[in-house]
Amino acid sequence: MSEPLDPERLKALNASALSPPLVTHIHTADPSAHVFEGRVYVYPSHDIERGVGFNDNGDHFMMEDYHVFRQDSPESEAVDCGVALHLDQVPWAHRQMWAPDAAEKDGTYYLYFPAKREDGLFQIGVASGPRPEGPFVPEPEPIAGSYSIDPAVFADEDGAYYLYFGGLWGGQLQHYRDNRYDPALAEPAADEPALGPRVGRLADDMKRFAEPPREVLILDEHGQPLRAGDNARRYFEAPWLHRYNGRYYLSYSTGDTHLLCYAVGDSPYGPFTYKGVLLTPVVGWTTHHSILEFGGRWWLYYHDSILSGGLTHLRNVKVAEIFYEEDGSIRTLHPYGG
């Protein structure tokens, strides 16, 4: 669903909503949530109004800083820890600090974020600090070999860290093949394999790739790659990886069909087999999320645009519990009942 909503429709959706906005004093989106030091830390985008009209490139998403939020548990109040990083601090970044993520290694915390360079191309940067809430000090240059948007870091049980990324349309992923940019490239034809997210193992310093990023393959139930025209299942943006009962779960947004879906595999590199819908469409065009375990229960952090009355570029973070079936599938959530 997109913008704007009439008052009666908005009232009905609020009444039936799965969960209320977690943060109400500012607009937040794209929540990456982690358990650090026994508490939940949420790293969202910070939506602001800049009067830019809506378009498919996302030019209306003009975010310029990051706030970090702390919770004692997913069911508790979210405390705003303040600005952790601002665009003005990042020498290479010129605009649009979109969805971030964070990781911890050996007592140092790392914030990963996309932004556009002066030439309009997205790359991914990294900043670090001694506290999960920041402030973070950015590296002077983006991560070499990075591109597109939506960084998500997965820490595996063997101590390896993997950086997933990539988003279509405004995220520019369609212009890359084999890690090379070509503005003439577009999405594959409908009957061709869909583009997948990228993943690269991080170096020990967490600031570089230890290897060239590779494409992640998402398969259908017959073991064939999902097709680009299968836009109710194919990857669009917002990758997230978590592990459950020894298997790897890749979840992501389908973009123009507004679903959060998931696929399951046996390696951080994939391939992953599509399994189903995690969350049906929310109010607003975009959908983006993270998944974590806390206290033996599993939680989905997501967003919608209820707080702004349906304005796609002014969103609000939410959280809801998710449930696994005995076969490892995840029960589909409906944000407004049904």
Image (cartoon, rainbow, N blue to C red):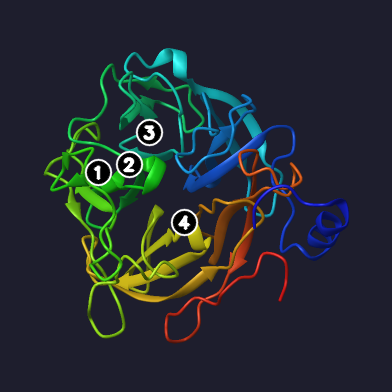
Q: Determine which residue is flagged by label 2.
A: 172
Q: Determine which residue is flagged by label 3.
A: 114
Q: Amino acid at mark 3?
A: Pro
Q: Determine which residue is flagged by label 1.
A: 175
Q: Amino acid at mark 4?
A: Gly
- Tell me the crowding category of disc 3: few under 14, some 14 to 19, or many 20 or more residues within 10 angstroms, Cα based: many
- Contact? badges 1 and 4 (CB < 8 Å): no
Q: Residue 176, how many percent across, how many down?
A: 21, 44
Q: Amino acid at mark 2?
A: Gln
Q: Determine which residue is flagged by label 4.
A: 255
Question: Across the whole image, how many numbered discs are drawn on residues?
Answer: 4
Foreground of the two, 281 or 249: 281
Q: Earlier in the sequence, mark 1 or mark 4?
A: 1
Q: Is residue 163 visible?
A: no
- Tell me the crowding category of disc 4: few under 14, some 14 to 19, or many 20 or more residues within 10 angstroms, Cα based: many
User: What secondary structure is marked by label 1?
Assistant: helix
